[in-house]
Amino acid sequence: MIATLIVVPILAAVLLLLLPRRAEGTAKWIGVAISFLAFFATIGLAGAPDESVRWLQRPFTANFHVGLGHGLSYWIVLLLTLSTGCALMATNVPRRRDFVAQMLFLLGAMAGVFLARDLVLFALFWDLMLIPVFFILLGWGPERSNSAWRYLLYNVTGGVALLLAVAAYGVLEGSTDLIGASLGHGASVVGNGWGLWIFAGFAFAFAIKTPVWPFHTWMPATYVDLPAPAVAVVSAVQSKAGLYGFIAIVLPLLPEQVQAAAGIMFVLGLVALVYGAVVALVQDDAKSIVAYSSLSHLGLIVLGIFSGNALALGGAAVYVIAHGLFSAGLFLAIDQFETREGSRSLKRLGGLGARNPKLAGGLTIVALAALGLPGLCGFAGEILILTGLYASGNVWPAVIALVPIVLAAAYMLRLFQDVMQGPEVADVPQRPDLTLLELLALAPLVVAIVLLGVNPGPVAGSANVQSAVSLVQGTR
Amino acid sequence: MIFALWLLPFAGALAIWAFGPQLKRLAGALGAATVLTSFAIALALAGQTFTGRGVKAPLVSWAQGFSFGLLLDPLSLLWVFVITGVGGLIHVYSIGYMSGDRAFARFFAYMNFFVFAMLTLVLSDNFVGLLVGWGLVGLASYFLIGFWFFKPSAVAAARKAFVINVVGDIGLMFGIFVLFAATHTTTYAGVFAKAGSLAPLTVTLACFGLFVACAAKSAQLPLHTWLPDAMEGPTPVSALIHAATMVTAGVYLIARCAPLWDVSPEARALVGTIGALTALTGAVLGCVQWDIKRILAYSTMSQIGYMIMGVGVGAYQAGILHFYTHAFFKATLFLGAGILIHALHDEQDVRKMGGLARRQPFAFWAMTVGTLAIIGFPGLSGFFSKDAVIYGTLEHGYPLLYAIGMVTAGITAYYMCRMLFVTFFGSYRGDVPSAQLGVAASTNPPVAHEAPSGHEGAHAPAWLMQVPVALLMIPSVIAGYVWFGSRDGPLAYGGPGSLWFGYFTTNFATRAEAVQAAVPEWLSTVLVLALVGIGAFVAYRRYAASAASANAVERLRAESLTAWRPLTRALYFDDAIELVFVRPASAIGAAFARVVDPQVLDGAVRDVAWLAGWLGREMRALQTGLVRGYALVVVLGVAGFLVYFAWFGTVR
């Protein structure tokens, strides 16, 4: 049954193309319905046994093996289905039938990435999830923009590195099944010579996807050019594929290499953390601010992952979900005022809050979650990651990582205040407040932001999270 | 019960937020009712709190060592009393004060949210819960400073307050790191149980982090600059958040963490010194302000300096007593000022006031009582608490801080009497042109208070505003007498060991470590009183004596124009922050965005990108479009994969 989470959205995407082109409303509601059905199906399937079908025998064993568990995979798939549903609910992009089809394909492919328990399967879905984003950029992005190609070039490069690493691992190990082969027997048998190259392949792919500084330059352009529903899902979930890969694949399979490379990853994570934050301070485009803030926040997660500390790793898992929730919310809220006022420029806009109190309220909560307000989800991830970092002896990274928290307050308030507060700008249209539907599209994200902020315990893993494996699969 | 105490104001906030338009005027009543009910619950729980080890309730567990709960012990109970008691009265006052505002309901939603946040802060039994409350009160403060969000100055003040408070938050986070790394827990009980066995450096580091948080929240040097600007908020907000409760959170934190401060002499010296310097700086800057709320803001900063100095050097009872009395008299002062501001159509410049004693007798008496209390007039509440703090520094062996505290007391008497005399004595100057008074033209036209029409001239306030002020005047006078009552008898002077106040400070009862002071307490009191008398007398000579009243306009003009510039620029703290932090951060960000991203990083991959672009163009030329280009890339990728795959397959 777990496989239906992958198959049904992809099938639906294909079948949608049979609808008449004008059935835009129907297509949208089909998309919303499938997303939320998948959301509830995921809840229903929590902890269901893995499903595995023999696939390849030579040159190594590969299985069509999917599993949900009740750990990180479970939470990310919930995030994926929820954010896709919310993103599609209030959308009014042109050519909606085709757009919804792309989004459903994206949903299925990404579910595949997070449910795969076999490296070959993982790599397959990894490449599949690039395709719809590429087509959305081409079809719905601004004309004369090369962001689609940039996205593709960067991510296919990473994809090829991933494939090579998977192949090498399979050949050396005899199996790419994540549960059956190596993990069942404890430590990996990959030696250091090849292990470092395999690690490099994985890390390269994951670092581009996340993105980790300095592989990030495709990201702001992609985020700015993608239409809102797509960027909400891409920033919320697709950017987590790399981080998930580090947690679910690299940490358990290549522990020695992780230790060897932790220093480099720490430096890259810290640079991303600070660099993204200071660049976000000076952006004028609201989407760019969120894009660079993502660079910063994802750097923090990298620190958590490579700290080797259970608390920080649990915090990283929380922050993976938290960032997904608030970045989806931010991009959706930005889209609401962009479609109303025709601009995302902080210089241009101002004083919208007076006539859009609901929109201002929604933007406030997601922005507060993003800047790490204690009590909301961003903070929960931050404090666990940083406390774990410090407690594991990484004193200076933890201290340096405190500075971007202040910067985050500055750039997020700047985004909110310059758009919503101050005197009303005379020549901006000031169109009416959120409709009920638009409000309903933001509400689930806001509720989740509060719930996760109050009690991140289930995501952080039970109190005895000892390893990445138990975090991904869940322990019970 | 403790959950009801904690969550009632929050429920009120949610209800007002959701149903504000339907509730209309009732929003204020609902807000006040929930807060006052919390106060009643706190009274009911008082007995339980004093006997045994307080009321406890577990909440959630995030991870190992991150388990949270509520704790109502005597120390938090005192804060709860002030938050809900003074807070409830200020809510009632606000119903009158905000009655003309379009966003009446929004105001009460924020105020109730603040009370909830502050209760979270003081009821938490652990550092992370404290930090949650710490952040949420900062948010409430941000909302309320920027309440009139169409004013650019209010928006800027709100942002500044929030960002500086986040600096404090990261200090608190650092403190949590250090304490968690050393003790593997975040609960007070767990941490303090091990406080004695920790390395001295660890404790000092933790105290330093915690004190950064205190400095930001309680407006201590050099993180105080947000507090004067915070006066952009409505006056009841200034009374509740920026005087009586939130800004005293730093005092609470240090008192709460007494077991840490007790084992770190360095932390004591640091906190005591910063507190004393803040007290002095606030008082000196208060002398050159003309905006009545800014005068009170600087006096708040100064008085909190006293409290921090008190709890910092180890005179916990004295510092806490000063928090307790200050809450009453400072709320009285702010609410009295609010009555004036309300009556004078948002005029806040004392130069444009004058002679209001006859026009506003109620406000006059309220402000007089508040002023006498704050300067330490014998018998009033501030007299006992300030004296206790000042003498406490000497008892704990800090004579230099003692001297600073004494001098500050004299300056306090001067600037508070100055405010009182200029506002209420002489003749009314509201119709004198600004230029003649030396009032600079405002860059931000006062559009703040959307008062309803029909308010003609200066008029008496509604009873809704007078009753809460009257109720606050009573403890402003008598609150200090909790210092009496000891084993020697109910009326005997007890000092830190007094019977009544002792209930609230049982946490510290066993830590009487005072050394024998060189100066006996009665002599110290006489010295302080002499300085206070001198300060008040100088203010009288300059602002209230008949010679001064006769040509008040010229004198005020001359004083405005000749004030020493470093003082009117508030000692350049703002400029320094701008120069050292804000501008460099923006410049670096701009440089990264313009140079590093497009030139350096993209430059490195530009050749490859160019290749891809070329490939794409060739594909378009050869075939039908981009789709095939993509397909080719995928095919090439897969082909590469298969080749590699096959080769390794044969190797094996």
Image: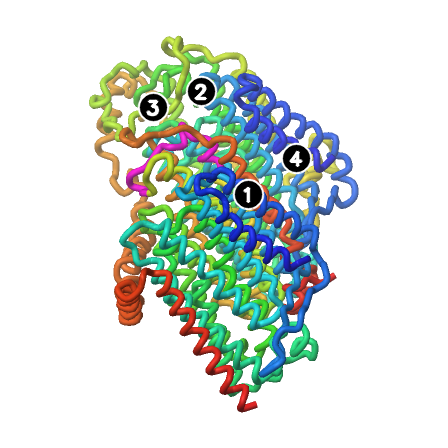
**Image quarter in which the N terminus of chain B is found:** top right
Q: Residues within 10 Å of mark 3 (few under 14, many from 20)?
A: few
Vertical placement of residue B152 versus B91, above or below = below
Res B512 seen here: no
Asked if marks 4 and 2 fall on the same chain, the answer is yes
Q: Which mark is residue B12?
A: none
Real-space CA distance between mark 3 and mark 4, rounded to the nearest whole angstrom: 35 Å
Vertical placement of residue A267 versus B30, above or below = below
**Amino acid bearing label 1:** Ile
Real-space CA distance between mark 3 and mark 1, rounded to the nearest whole angstrom: 50 Å
In magenta stretch: residue A353: yes
Q: Residues within 10 Å of mark 2 (few under 14, many from 20)?
A: some
Q: Position of residue A62 (x, y in %)?
A: 61, 75
Q: Secondary structure at mark 3?
A: loop
Q: Secondary structure at mark 1?
A: helix
Location of residue B619 by image quarter: bottom left
Per the image, the residue denoted by label 4 is: B7
**Amino acid bearing label 2:** Asp
Nearest the viewer among B186 and B59 is B59
Asked if marks 3 and 1 fall on the same chain, the answer is no
**Position of residue A271 in the picture relative to residue B395 (left or right):** left
Sequence-wise, which precedes: disc 4 or disc 2? Answer: 4
**Amino acid bearing label 4:** Leu
Q: Secondary structure at mark 4?
A: helix
Sequence-wise, which precedes: disc 3 or disc 4? Answer: 4
Nearest the viewer among A236 and A12 is A12
**Image quarter in which the C terminus of chain B is found:** bottom right
* Range drawn in magenta: A345-362
